[in-house]
Amino acid sequence: MTLTTTAAPGVRIRDLTVVYRTPHGELPAVRGVDLTLAPGTITGVVGESGSGKSTLALSLLNAVQPPGRIASGSVEIDGIGDVVRLGGERLRQTRGRRIGYVFQAAQNSLNPLKTIGKQLLDLGRSHGVEDLRGLVRDAKELLARMGMDGARVLDSYQHELSGGMRQRVGIMLALVLNAKVVVLDEPTTALDMITQAMILRIVREIHEERGLTTLIITHDVGAVAEIADDLAVMYGGRVVEHGPVEEVLGSPAHPYTQALIRAIPRLSGDLSLARPLPGRPPTLGTLPVTGCVFRERCDRRMPICETDDPAQVVAGGRTVACHAVVPPHAPAEPAMRKEYA
Ligand SMILES: Nc1ncnc2c1ncn2[C@@H]1O[C@H](COP(=O)(O)OP(=O)(O)OP(=O)(O)O)[C@@H](O)[C@H]1O
Ligand code: SF4
Ligand SMILES: [Mg+2]
């Protein structure tokens, strides 16, 4: 499934902690996360609302805004360096040109006073694109691939487009500058299921044609399973499991991943066996300070889970953070993955 080219950059997130200032002090929304995006792969990120997915995505662009801040850790991208240490003009040039992105609710972030075409030209100029005609041509082609009349869309203001059309414009803007790393945060939520599947397939095609490294966040585990190579499962600001998508979904190791899959009939394969996840996801204020973040809802909880936060243990191609999972759990890793582990 994976098509790798030498041009695709690897991304190594190490010990990343991002906090938000709250009335109770600074609390972590992402805590001690290690995550490697192998070059040329699509990594899906799933997890309940509030688990830290968007905060993680913003960190890849060093775009966490106050009251949040990256408290520690690094995001090393081949050919760019540690994004956390970038600032000023270098950071601005990196965003968009080197790292393409769609932020969550991007359909609401277009400028209402300018046509899409004008915004495209502004984007090109701000990144020093000389061939603006070529940029417009590429934009039209991307829009056409996503089932839209490119010329018409570029002549439109955002209010003339539906939510789903605006989301596709967002995806076009993320891809049009030919960035090699692409971060998509819920890029298709405003689309119906069939269009969503079509757009995700096109994202996969473009990813392969251009040799990209892509991170995609979605609530729809089933949809991402069809296009991702790897899957990262987040809970309470931690990546609790990460590995090849077929392995994580086919033989989930972490109790949270297991519960998540049981809750999705399309994946569990049997409607009558589907069981909703008991309890509620934690908020920043209710996250346990010590021990495992999932323990309140875990049926395999042990005394150590109350006191010790389980480390992310690398086992073959899989990473799992759970005291009940003893490595090696996963099969041997492919050579490419080793290089970036
Ligand atoms: N600006 C902010 N100020 C304070 N807390 C925040 C802020 N943004 C996010 N948070 C908190 O950080 C945690 C992680 O939020 P984040 O938006 O990253 O989650 P998410 O997994 O993307 O959720 P969703 O699926 O709803 O998009 C949540 O508890 C959220 O309430
Ligand atoms: S560390 Fe303990 S509480 Fe956490 S998921 Fe594993 S068994 Fe459950
Ligand atoms: Mg989010």
Image (cartoon, rainbow, N blue to C red):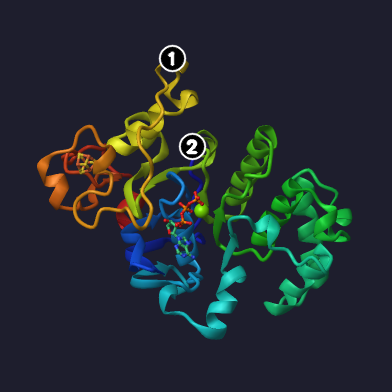
Say which residue label 1 marks: 272
Q: Percent x, y for residue 131? A: 78, 73
* In-front residue for pair 189/278: 278
Label 1 crowding class (10 Å Cα cut-off): few <14, some 14-19, many 20+? Answer: few
Residue 120 higher or lower than 44, as above or below: below
Q: Amino acid at mark 1?
A: Ser
Residue at point 46%, 47% (across, down): 49
Is residue 17 visible to the viewer in this orientation of the structure?
A: no
Residue 325 higher or lower than 269, as above or below: below
The nearer-to-camera label among 1 and 2 is 1
Number of on-image labels: 2
Q: Percent x, y for residue 261? A: 40, 31
Residue at point 44%, 44% (across, down): 48
Is residue 332 visible to the viewer in this orientation of the structure?
A: yes
* In-front residue for pair 206/115: 115
Label 2 crowding class (10 Å Cα cut-off): few <14, some 14-19, many 20+? Answer: many
Q: SS class of the residue under badge 1? A: helix
Residue 219 higher or lower than 115, as above or below: above
In the picture, the disc for residue 142 is none
* In-front residue for pair 215/103: 103
Q: Percent x, y for residue 103? A: 59, 59
Which comes before the other along the chain, label 1 or label 2?
2
Image quadrant in which you'd find residue 59:
bottom left
Say which residue label 2 marks: 221
